[in-house]
Image: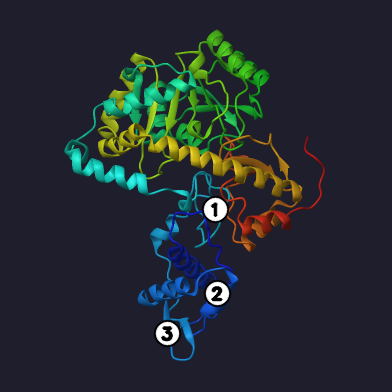
């Protein structure tokens, strides 16, 4: 019984054992009364202390999942029931909307960090501090532009990216998703055309469809959007906007090359097109790079803290010209009465104390290690890799196995959940390329899955 305990996780080992045993019982469908392997055996196989295994089993006894029987150790008490909320929690951006995930599946295709990577100490301290010292943060609405203290901190963090901006040009949002929604609601109308990257961000495609905005596809290359195609689209269709994911692009992991960034801005200026730069993975980037917003103050820049700090603590922001920010703020107040002042106060505290900066430094180091290992695993399995990203969360890759249905079958066999084949296409065209989340790719289940799909087929390029 392999439990796959993560030694680097901040989740206590006993709780990991509880979760792993629950998942094992669910998948094995062991009948009531069936004996578990002995505590000594479980501990030996998983390099655990027997006391930790006993404590985890006792917790499951208290929950009715296990029972004790004299001379038989721990036995199955009752079939594991998965609550509806647990099933719904297995969804992720890019997943099949109607597909029910299974308990304990490895979310190889998901868009965020694993829960075990999340750090609670600094976050808990900031929450307690706001609760004790900031009554307004607990009970009041935030201001239309967002908490001034937070906007000032955001402005400071943008300076190392060469984005010089006054806090009056920053609007806080409930994550980048609300930011994009406000932009689409405010600046575009049904029937308008915009340029989007393909492959690209699936929720942006859904949002544009929802508002009746037509999409024109520009292929994403390892250096950014295909400039020749972009030039043709702008000349032929005269779209009103361009949406670009600058660094560590979702899903390919690629980043804008400086020469491509300048050409995008030159073309946008020539054709009078609004550029919207989505840079939600900015804090996972530590090397040199060129942001569009650093080259042109007319670019609308979208950022977020959901990917790094907490997907539940919904805080993002938009940087734009004063007139655009004023219009966006008006729509924000009409549609949602503003963002959460409590969440903004917690984030402002973490930024001011330096805790957030240290957090993302640790995340970058861990991702760098796992990315190198993941790229080696994919190379060993003879998967094709798009661009070999130098940072961020994602690798865009595919098996050389010609039968994509067999790839899905192998993923299910090893308890691996992939992203939807159509999620990253603006037109919903299926693809056998997969978004591989670096933080999950070194799990033994992922390694086994990659090796099982390492069959030869001709190179794509």
Q: CA distance from mark 3 to mark 1?
A: 33 Å
Residue 217, picture quadrant: top right
Q: Position of residue 181 (x, y in %)?
A: 40, 31
The quarter of the rendered structure image containing the C terminus is top right
Q: Residues within 10 Å of mark 2 (few under 14, many from 20)?
A: some
Q: Position of residue 142 (x, y in %)?
A: 24, 32
Looking at the image, is mark 3 or mark 1 earlier in the sequence?
Answer: 3
Q: What mark, if any, has residue 68 been given in the picture? A: 3
Q: Which residue is mark 2?
A: 42
Q: Residues within 10 Å of mark 3 (few under 14, many from 20)?
A: some
Residue at (34%, 37%) from the top-left corner?
Answer: 350
Q: What mark, if any, has residue 350 been given in the picture? A: none
Q: Nearer the viewer, mark 2 or mark 1?
A: 2
Looking at the image, is mark 2 or mark 3 earlier in the sequence?
Answer: 2
Q: Secondary structure at mark 3?
A: strand
Q: What mark, if any, has residue 107 been given in the picture? A: 1
């Amino acid at each position: 019984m392999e439990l796959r305990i993560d030694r680097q996780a901040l989740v206590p080992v006993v709780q990991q054992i509880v979760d792993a045993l629950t998942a094992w019982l669910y998948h094995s469908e062991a009948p009531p009364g069936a004996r578990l392997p002995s505590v000594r055996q479980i501990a030996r196989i998983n390099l655990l202390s027997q006391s930790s295994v006993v404590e985890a089993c006792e917790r499951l006894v208290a929950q009715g999942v296990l029972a004790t029987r004299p001379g038989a150790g721990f036995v199955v008490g009752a079939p594991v029931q998965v609550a509806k909320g647990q099933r719904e929690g297995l969804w992720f951006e890019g997943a099949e909307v109607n597909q029910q995930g299974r308990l304990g599946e490895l979310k190889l295709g998901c868009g965020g960090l694993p829960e075990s990577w999340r750090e609670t100490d600094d976050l808990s301290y900031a929450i307690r501090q706001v609760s004790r010292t900031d009554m307004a943060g607990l009970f009041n609405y935030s201001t239309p532009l967002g908490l001034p203290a937070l906007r000032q901190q955001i402005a400071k963090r943008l300076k190392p990216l060469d984005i010089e901006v006054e806090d009056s040009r920053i609007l806080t949002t409930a994550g980048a998703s609300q930011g994009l929604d406000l932009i689409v609601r405010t600046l575009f109308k049904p029937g308008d055309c915009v340029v989007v990257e393909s492959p690209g961000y699936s929720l942006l495609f859904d949002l544009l469809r929802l508002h009746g905005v037509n999409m024109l596809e520009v292929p994403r290359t390892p250096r950014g959007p295909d400039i020749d195609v972009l030039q043709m689209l702008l000349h032929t269709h005269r779209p009103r906007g361009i949406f670009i994911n600058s660094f560590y692009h979702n899903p390919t992991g690629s980043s804008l090359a400086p020469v491509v960034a300048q050409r995008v801005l030159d073309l946008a200026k020539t054709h009078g097109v609004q550029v919207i730069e989505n840079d939600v993975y900015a804090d996972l980037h530590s090397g040199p790079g060129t942001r569009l917003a650093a080259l042109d103050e007319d670019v609308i820049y979208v950022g977020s803290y959901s990917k790094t700090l907490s997907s539940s603590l919904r805080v993002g922001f938009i940087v734009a010209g004063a007139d655009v920010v004023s219009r966006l703020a008006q729509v924000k107040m009409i549609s949602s009465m503003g963002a959460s002042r409590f969440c903004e106060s917690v984030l402002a505290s973490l930024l001011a104390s330096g805790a957030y900066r240290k957090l993302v430094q640790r995340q970058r180091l861990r991702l760098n290690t796992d990315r190198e290992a993941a790229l080696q695993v994919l190379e060993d399995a003879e998967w094709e890799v798009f661009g070999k990203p130098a940072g961020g969360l994602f690798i865009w890759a595919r098996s050389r196995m010609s039968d994509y249905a067999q790839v899905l079958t192998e993923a299910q066999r090893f308890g691996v959940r992939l992203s939807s084949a159509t999620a990253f296409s603006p037109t919903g065209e299926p693809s056998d390329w997969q978004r591989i989340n670096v933080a999950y790719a070194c799990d033994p289940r992922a390694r086994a899955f990659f090796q099982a799909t390492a069959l030869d087929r001709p190179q794509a390029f």
